[in-house]
Image: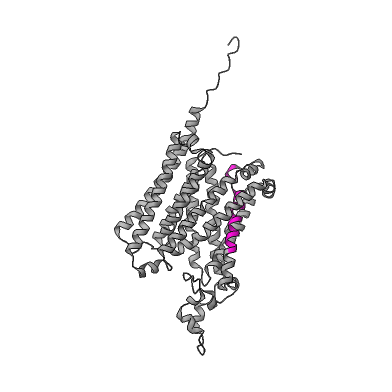
Amino acid sequence: MNSNPNPFLGLIYHWLGGLASGSFYVPFRFVRNWSWETYWLTGGVFSWIIAPWLFASLQTNDLLDVLSETPARTLALTYLFGVLWGMGGLTFGLTMRYLGMSLGMAVALGYTAAFGTMVPPIVKGELMTKILPTLSGQVVVFGVLVCLAGIAVAGMAGMSKEREMSEEAKRASIQEFNFKKGLAVATFSGVMSACFAFGLDASGPIKELTRRHGTDDLWSGLPSLVVILAGGFTTNFLWCAFLHWKNGSAHQYLSPVARPEAGTTGRDEILENPTDAPAEEAALQAPGLAPTPEADADRRVPLLSNYFFSALAGVTWYFQFFFYTMGETKMGEDYKFSSWTLHMASIMIFSTLWGIALKEWTGTSARTKRLVALTLAVLIGSTVIIGWGNSLAPAEQAEAAPPTAEAPAEPGA
């Protein structure tokens, strides 16, 4: 059955999704002696394959029947958007490697929020005909603009931080900080990541079919995630397989000891070229020099721990869209496009808080810290504005509905 709109409950679901997305990268910080492609793909198997199928099977009816009844064109288009989104998701991890959580998410999510929110209603022709002519629609669009302003302020804070911090301080908090490379990667990532919103929009027939099979509307988006995330897995698997071939790192899934040619020596040293290994590793390979016990300890790979933290990161990542699909069902049919902005704003809020907790803003000026505080205030305000705009819609629709004709009085009444 279809659930009744409840924008403020939807807002809570979106905040939970934002918390999951803003937090997913933290467990990866505890992975030791694995290259980026190893822990990214390990986490991705849980994000894109295991979790979607598990939760869709548990919470929806007749999952396989629903997918088999879905028109081939819908499946293909939804999957294709997932493949394109996968390119953005893949480079999203690289964005945080080069810019850190706060600045990286600000740039990437700015593009993602703008494209993912506004393109679907524009393509459908609903922006000018159903949204802007109403007060509720105007409030929602204003909230979207406030969100984009908040993301812009976050970007200003990140650039202010980049100007103020010394190179040594930057690398103390973000080992591979590179502003120019990070900006280019974040731009590409943001635009391609918006394809997830397009995939959700294209998967409408899947949602309708699962509802026909008796799935409650609250869970009706979960089968769509199975298809979209399969596309994302395809892109990421191919790229990580290429990196395994290039870096000789495929053995890491089973090896208890890190090999020098793997191109990584620890949690934050993710090197793309084996020749970039630190001098002390090169010395260990020199003739006549036996490895020391300390060096052996540094090169041990805690396989069980690495799998655990990678899986934790992957499942945490999946929960952003688990809660997203729940929140979307509560925003009302006309303004469900605003869910994408709520999602982006929530991610920014919690990723900024994580950036503060992880001391990414240590050493910055009072001005920069005020910009960070302003970012949080504006983004939180944007989510409240959008939720309020959605709450106005039912009253407007009731006023616009034609009056019900009164039944004629019965004789003798």
Image height of 148 relative to 302, above or below? above
Q: Is residue 400 magenta?
A: no
Q: Main secondary structure of the magenta part?
A: helix
The residue located at (38%, 67%) in the rendering is: 170
Would you say 345 lies left or right of 254 here? Answer: left
The residue located at (41%, 60%) in the rendering is: 355
Q: Horizontal and vertical percent for residue 314? A: 55, 60
Instruction: Kindly give the residue lying farthest to the bottom in the view shown.
Output: 288
Instruction: Kindly give the residue lying farthest to the left in the view shown.
Output: 366
Q: Which residues are magenta?
A: 217-238
Q: Horizontal and vertical percent for residue 97? A: 46, 64
Q: Horizontal and vertical percent for residue 89? A: 52, 58
State whether residue 316 appears in this view. Answer: no
Q: Is residue 231 magenta?
A: yes
The residue located at (61%, 49%) in the rendering is: 77
Give the quarter of the figure containing the N terminus: top right
Q: How many numbered dots are placed on residues in this image? A: 0
